[in-house]
Amino acid sequence: MRIAQVISSNLPIKPTGERGWGATELIMDEYTKNLRILGHQVDLLYLNDILPGIYDIVHIHVANLCLEAHKRGIEYVYSTHDHHSFHYGKNSFNYKEQLEAIKNSIFSLAPAEYVVDYFDDTDKLFYLSHGVDTEYYTPTKAFYDTKHQPNILHYLLMCANNGVAGDYGADRKGFRYGIESAKALNLPITIIGADANTKFFEIHKDLLDYQLLTVIDNNPTEEEKLQLFKNHTIFLHPSNLEFGHPNLTLLEAASCCLPMVATYKGSKNIDGMYKIDEISTENVINGIKYIINDYPRIVDNMAKPRSSYSWLNVCKQLEKKYLAIKQFHNFDSDTIRDKYSNVYNNI
């Protein structure tokens, strides 16, 4: 197939190890790389460079470009990555723009099952999980240490850009719960992310009083981030709003065999994860204690399934969805889901 992935911003689309903090750009790079491995021609192009009828698939990743493509008569597949539509609600501009982009698509994809349920005004939205580069995110030092010394020292890690919708003080990623839990257990904790976190801690200065807290908020490179994953033993992710279940950092932790304490609403099984249904410091503490008490077994069980999280496996599912388009031409928004699923399942 001839596939166009539509560039949606000025952030560079770089290979693993050279990326910055653009999640959508990371996903586009992985789709491009792995679909090429599967034998397809994939081009990264701006929408202005795409003419109708040249590509079998035009895949767009932001809603406003979907609306423009529709005006130009370009049929497209859409992946939504926008958590603001959920944050602001169904009466918001964000939700209405996302809904229009989905309805005008051949079909659309979301990386969280609850998002598919949330957009119940359309039948064109399907679930496709995020993936991870399992050859880059490999097991941590602690994974090997536990083979020889089960009672290792523990170091907590959080990796996120906090805030939501311009509110830098909003604790969407649960930094307070993580720091309070670390303090209660007298454990060191590192928080890494972009410079938006600087503004969060300017508002929540009290959190910086914990002496075993390290904050790295200078947009560390992916190589620097990988080393921090490898040098810590437990990953914390008590987030109250994620548009991916699992999101990218949870899959990175899983691929590193780094046990997790996290909020998670997906049906996909993630080995090594202690799930917390209600976010509280007490529940995060309980999760950390549970992992510490059974650390060697938990880490060991994470090794076998890690390859299943790979982007190549995700792109094999994406390939099937693309191929179904070739056999299915009725894209009515009210009836597509069951009909399209039947075609997809028979490929």
Image (cartoon, grey):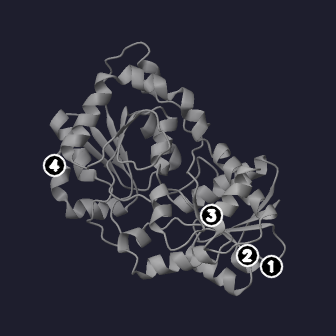
Q: Are marks 1 and 3 in contact (CB under 8 Å)?
A: no
Q: Amino acid at mark 3?
A: Arg
- Which percent across, then down, holds residue 119? 48, 69
Instruction: Report the mark closest to the observer, 3 or 4.
Output: 3
Q: Are marks 2 and 4 in contact (CB under 8 Å)?
A: no
Look at 40% across and 69% down and name the residue there. Answer: 86
Look at 36% across and 59% down and name the residue there. Answer: 241
Q: Amino acid at mark 2?
A: Glu
* Cα separation between marks 2 and 3: 18 Å
In the displayed structure image, the side of residue 336 where residue 137 appears, left or right? left
Q: Amino acid at mark 1?
A: Pro
Query: At numbered mark 1, what does the secondary structure look like: helix, strand or loop?
Result: loop
* Cα separation between marks 2 and 4: 54 Å
Query: At numbered mark 4, what does the secondary structure look like: helix, strand or loop?
Result: helix
Instruction: Give the mark nearer the N terminus: 2 vs 1.
Output: 1
* Cα separation between marks 2 and 1: 8 Å
Mark identifier at residue 52 = 1
Mark identifier at residue 209 = 4
Query: Which part of the image, by quadrant, shows the N terminus?
Result: bottom right
Instruction: Give the mark nearer the N terminus: 2 vs 3.
Output: 2
How crowded pointer 4 is (Cα within 10 Å; few <14, some 14-19, many 20+) is rated as few
Q: Are marks 2 and 1 in contact (CB under 8 Å)?
A: yes
Q: Are marks 2 and 3 in contact (CB under 8 Å)?
A: no
Look at 52% across and 75% down and name the residue there. Answer: 98
